[in-house]
Each structure stands twice: as structure tokens, then as C-alpha cells.
Image (spheres, rainbow, N blue to C red):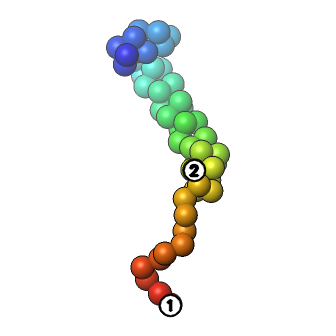
Amino acid sequence: MYAALWRVLPGPVWVRILILLVLLAVVLYALVTWVFPWVDSFIVKEGDTVGT
């Protein structure tokens, strides 16, 4: 799968690496912005083991 992605990307090696870094940043931003808060809403926060 990664080899197919590498072949599809245009340009020389440094451009491919730059594109992959930008895509990685976009995916991480989407995870932190939308996916993790959505999953957090399903996690039960009762029963903490550390009290104040």
C-alpha cells in the first residue's frame, strides 16, 4: 500500500516527502480537532481512582 502511494505522488523525492509531511499534518490536525473529542464523549469518566 505504501509503495502504491509513493508511486502515485508526483515529483522528485523531496517533493514526495514534503507532500507526505503535509498530509500527515492534516490527518493529525483532523484527529485532534474532530475525532478525539468525538470519541471522548463516549468514554465514561466516572470511577476515577485518584481523589482530591
Residue 46 x %, y %: 54, 72
Q: Earlier in the sequence, mark 1 or mark 2?
A: 2
Residue beneath the point at 63% across and 49% down: 38
The front one of 45 and 35 is 45
Q: Which residue is mark 2?
A: 39
Residue beneath the point at 54% across and 32% down: 22
Badge 1 local density, few (<14 within 10 Å), some, or many (20+)? Answer: few
Residue 29 is labelled as: none
State the quadrant of the N terminus: top left
Res 7 quadrant in image: top left
Q: Is residue 49 visible?
A: yes
Considering the numbered disc 1 on the image, is that residue within a helix, a strand or a loop?
loop
Label 1 and label 2: CA atoms lie apart by 26 Å
Residue beneath the point at 55% across and 59% down: 43
Residue beneath the point at 43% across and 25% down: 17
Residue 52 is labelled as: 1
Asked whether, in this view, residue 42 is left or right of residue 50, the answer is right
Considering the numbered disc 2 on the image, is that residue within a helix, a strand or a loop?
helix
The front one of 21 and 4 is 4
Residue 31 x %, y %: 56, 43
Asked whether, in this view, residue 27 is left or right of residue 34, the answer is left
